[in-house]
Amino acid sequence: MDNRLMVLPSVKPEGIRVVSIPEDIDGQEAFRHATGVISGVEENDPDYTWEDIEDALDEHGYRVLEFVLGPALD
């Protein structure tokens, strides 16, 4: 199984997410597509939560994955 992964960045380390990219989406288009999905949630619900975004990404085939973020490098 070949997993293609994408990091969704955040200003705060606890906001960083790693998702798997759906097979039917080209790797070059995945980030643009995912940010469009996220923007749609933000525009439709000003009181959105991460769970709302996760649900929307899930509907489009993205899967949020568990990961370990290493220590800060100063």
Image: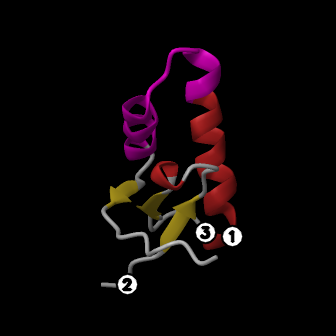
Q: Secondary structure at mark 2?
A: loop
Q: Is residue 34 above or below residue 6?
A: above
Dominant secondary structure, magenta:
helix
Q: Are the residues flagged by discs 1 and 3 in contact, CB closer than 8 Å? A: yes
Mark 1 to mark 2 CA distance (whole Å): 16 Å
Q: Is residue 44 magenta?
A: yes
Please state if 73 lies on the left or on the right of 18 as rendered.
Answer: right
Amino acid at pointer 2: Asp
- Residue nearer the viewer, 30 or 65: 65
Residue that label 2 marks: 2
Residue that label 3 marks: 26
First of labels 3, 2 by sequence position = 2
Mark 1 to mark 3 CA distance (whole Å): 5 Å
Q: Which residues are magenta?
A: 41-59
Residue at 47% x, 72% y is 5
Mark identifier at residue 28: 1
